[in-house]
Amino acid sequence: MTIHLTAADYGAVLPIMIVLGGALCLLLTDAFVKVHETEIATGISLATLLLAFAASAHLWAVNAGPAFPQGAGAMITGDRFGQFFNFALLLSSALAILIAPPYIRTSHFDAGEFLSLILFATAGMMLMAASLNLMVIFLSIELLSLALYILSGFDRNRPRSQEAGFKYFLLSSFASAFLIYGMALIYGATGSTNLIRIVNVLGGHAGTVASTHTVLSSPFVLIGIALMAVGFAFKLSIVPFHMWTPDVYQGAPTPVTAFMSVATKAAVFPAFLRVFNLALGAESHRWFGILWALAIVTMIVGNVLALSQSSMKRLLAYSGIAHAGYVLVAMSANNRLGATAVAFYFIVYAFMNIGAFALVLVLESRGEAGDEIATYRGLFARSPLLAVATGVFMFSLAGFPPTAGFFAKYYAFAAAVQAGHTELAIIGVITSVISLGYYLRVVVLMFMQPVEAGAEQVRAGPLSDFMLTASVAGLFVVGLVPWFYNLAVQAVQSFFHFTT
């Protein structure tokens, strides 16, 4: 069979190609440029992300469709749903890169290698958000994971970083085996790895009613759903597949932790949605119970275990686990409002979670114990901007109005209520109240405790100051200006295009 590719096919992957090109450019520059390496590498990285953002904006405007044809379907899509998550991924990468230079200098990292790996991981994440084929989803997971394995263990002088890289590699590889085996079983039941083709088969649009009934009654479908749920749950830090998360987050270099805490989830959730809410939408009665149970246990365990943490990175790791549970509530609703809530959540999450890691990074860049929550005592007296910004991030993570974190949780819980699953929303609200115990503890230490004698003033640096200011502004603007939520609504309209 001859496949004819057009300019539209290559245009659909233009943002991904730009990011990959920028990563290769960084490696070449690193080989020849030996002065001002960190500044040049940072500039190239941010310029690459800006170009990729412009390309994604163009694809959004033209509302590009499926690309790279495969039989009756396509391998990827340039639709608005994928582009919306591209915006979230590019934003996450940019925020992480903005706060990275001081840490790179302090840790004596090779800036070109470090930042190029972030770009390679970003490219894999963008490909995953655009995937319409199970094999492309798996390959994109491996691309982003390989880069994150290396980044987690990048600090070769710290045994904890080496442990983080090895632990992430070992457990992630195990989870990938579950995922690919689940995909193989779905292929065995439906005869295709293409999501659009799977929708047609399971929805009764391909073949006779009898043949469709045979597919639906196949044990391969149920086992495949269960195995894929395990694989996705690991990547998303969903309980009980979360145990790697606190250790890896604490051991990895802080810019890497900040990046992967947001970007990995922002890449995997759209693929999770495409596979379960679209391709396996007709089988929702089989997978809803799994997601329902995972959402509840994830919200409870993440918030309860965060209460006892003395490490900021571990606290934010358990916080991220809890937030994965909130997003899973929206996904479990299996409706348009739920998909919209998932998309909107990650624009908000990028600002508040990467911003929260900035405090750790700034203090570590000064040689202080930035990971110890106890060292934040009286921080407001040492750095008013850093303390106020971190306070806003904590309030937003907790879901206080009028920050965008409140609206993100509201839309997620509203989707569950609309779908008739009020119990999920109630448990989400209760666990959000529990989270006040650890978010407000950080705020109280910074603003209501006296500063230690002899403590020096803290200056974050121009790039970090810009990032903090932009993130705080973003949390209010995204929450209060309806335009951003309307973009998420438009994205979800293209998401459901294939089933209408």
Image: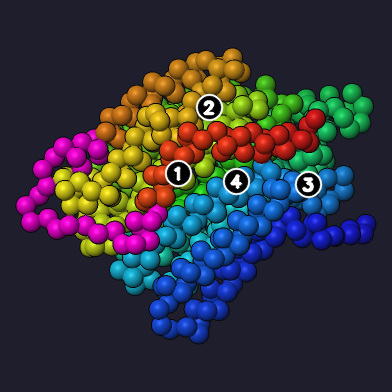
385 vs 173, nearest the viewer: 385
Q: Which mark is residue 42?
A: none
Select label 3 or label 1 by which is in front: 1
Pick the residue in front: 489 or 66.
Answer: 489
**Residue ID for mark 2:** 411
Does the segment drawn in magenta span residue 482?
Answer: no
**Which of the two discs, 3 and 2, labels the residue nearer the N terminus?**
3
Say what amino acid the circle numbered 3 marks. Answer: Gly
According to the picture, the residue beneath numbered tag 4 turns out to be 85
Q: Which residues are magenta?
A: 441-467
Within-10-Å neighbours for mark 1: few <14, some 14–19, many 20+:
some
Residue 474 is marked as 1
Q: Is residue 325 above or below residue 15?
A: above
- How far is disc 2 from disc 4 in space, using C-alphas? 17 Å
Q: Is residue 223 above or below residue 101?
A: above
Q: Secondary structure at mark 1?
A: helix
Residue drawn at the location 65% of the way across and 52% of the way down: 57
- The image shows residue 112 at horizontal and vertical percentages of 47, 73
Q: Which residue is mark 3?
A: 65
Q: Earlier in the sequence, mark 3 or mark 1?
A: 3
Report the Cα–Cα distance between label 4 and label 3: 15 Å
Q: Are marks 4 and 1 in contact (CB under 8 Å)?
A: no
Q: Is residue 269 visible?
A: yes
For the residue marked with disc 1, what is the amino acid?
A: Gly
